Image: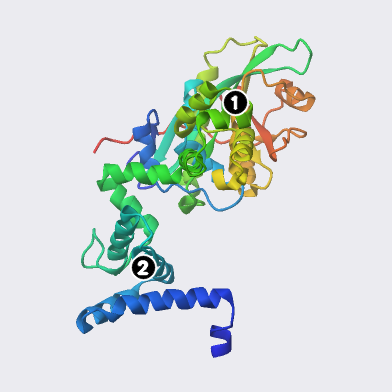
Amino acid sequence: MTNHPHQLYATPLTSEADQTRLVGFNCGTEHFAGHVAEWILGSDVFDSIKRGTRVWIFETVAGHVVGYGSLGTTRWKWPLPDGQRTSLVIIPMLGMDSRYFGQPPEPEWRYANQMMAHLIHEATRLVSEWPRGDKKYCRKLVLFVHRDNRRAIRFYERCGFEAISGSIDESGHFKMLYDLDDDE
Amino acid sequence: MTDTMLPDTPQTMARLDSVSCLLDWMRDMEPALRRQFVGALMECSDSIQQAVVSMMVIAKDQQAAPQDRQRALTTLADALFLRPDETDKDYGQPLAESETYTAKINPALNREVRTMNSQQEFFARQVRAIMDSKRLSQQDLAVRMGCTQPAISQLLDRLPHCRPQKRTIHKLAEALAVPPQELWPDLETAEMLDAVARFQQDDYAMTVAEAAALSASGKSKVKLKPKPLPTRPRR
């Protein structure tokens, strides 16, 4: 299975030495794309790792970096003055080098699908350790995306994410949800 | 043809300056070397040719720092003469491709390329350079920003390793009396990164719509099948 030429591999990113592998990483020239490379090349990725986020570099067998993905948890408050916190799984950032957009042509080996399938698998594994029926834990995966990033929005919808209407923030991002309960 | 190629504009003058720089350069060359040089230049892509002319301007600039001139000459050699990695192939190589290749074999350059890639390290260098050029001490900056000198010292120490928030960029720019873009050319990126940091924050108070969506138990119609990726075999 792993001998297929389009098989991606996930390598954990843990240190600045791993970061150097992303030299030249570029997610495109659109106004919503610059920060995706900056996040992984700068200090934000390590700030996130300090909060418990796991980060993977996705690469081909030849070692070409196709993209990266991250997965973490956060505790948001319900919108009440004494709102309780709830834990949920988030994808803080996910980026693909623009050279690999839409590649390879075979849908079953599409790099973006492989990357997201890996993140959903890891998220499912994470929530499987959470107690069922406890309202402090929400078994959903959340990511956020810029409203102008139509390519990404379409992709997330195809993966099963649904937009939360009314969640747009001042930077133009809105949140999308994926129900992890189905996958356990 | 001449009218369209050479309108009387500042851009034309800039272009002529570049051409003049190129001709100056070639004037002292041996004819054989000149032919080799022109041949190599003509085989380069448009973007490489532009880079060559820019590098020549730097190399000829007596005011430029010696290391910048040396770097310009190295880039010129890489662009015009044979590929460092494949000596029997085309002339010229896109800069990014050359950087990536060379970075792979040269850890020091690797670090430098990464530094150039990250705006926050550029930001750190800019702040220190502007402080130096304006002869501003940390104490001066502290007064202008309405904080203490130790706070400024801590900020400067953390700068290369810690991204400043957009409001910090504005505050520093105001204190240094420079446009914020001079410190962080792409302010929109800073704003986006702030948004990512907020997204991960604990204690974020959800909107009513977000809370309702999180409580809903609707199942998605389509789903991507979860599948772990293997770890790449060590080479």
| Left or right relative to B108: residue B172 | right
Looking at the picture, tell me which residue is in the foreground, B61 or B218: B61
Place of residue B223 in the rendered image (x, y in percent of width and height, measured from the top left): 60, 35
* Vertical arrangement, residue A75 with respect to residue A169, above or below: above
Residue under numbered circle 2 = B56
Q: Mark 1 — on which chain does it sit?
A: B
* Colour convention of the picture: rainbow
Residue occupying image coordinates x 79% and y 13%: A81
- The quadrant the C terminus of chain B occupies is top left
In this figure, what is the number of numbered marks?
Answer: 2
Pick the quarter of the image with the N terminus of chain B.
bottom right
- Residue B165 is situated, as x and y percent measured from the top left of the image, at 59, 33
Q: Nearer the viewer, mark 2 or mark 1?
A: 2
Above or below, comparing residue B212 to residue B115 in the picture: above
SS category of the residue bearing label 2 = helix
Relative to residue A169, is residue A56 drawn left or right?
left
How far is disc 2 from disc 1 in space, using C-alphas?
47 Å
Q: Is the same chain shared between marks 2 and 1?
A: yes
Q: Chain of mark 2?
A: B
What type is the residue that disc 2 sits on? Met
**Amino acid carrying mark 1 in the image:** Gln
Residue A126, position in %: x, y? 51, 19
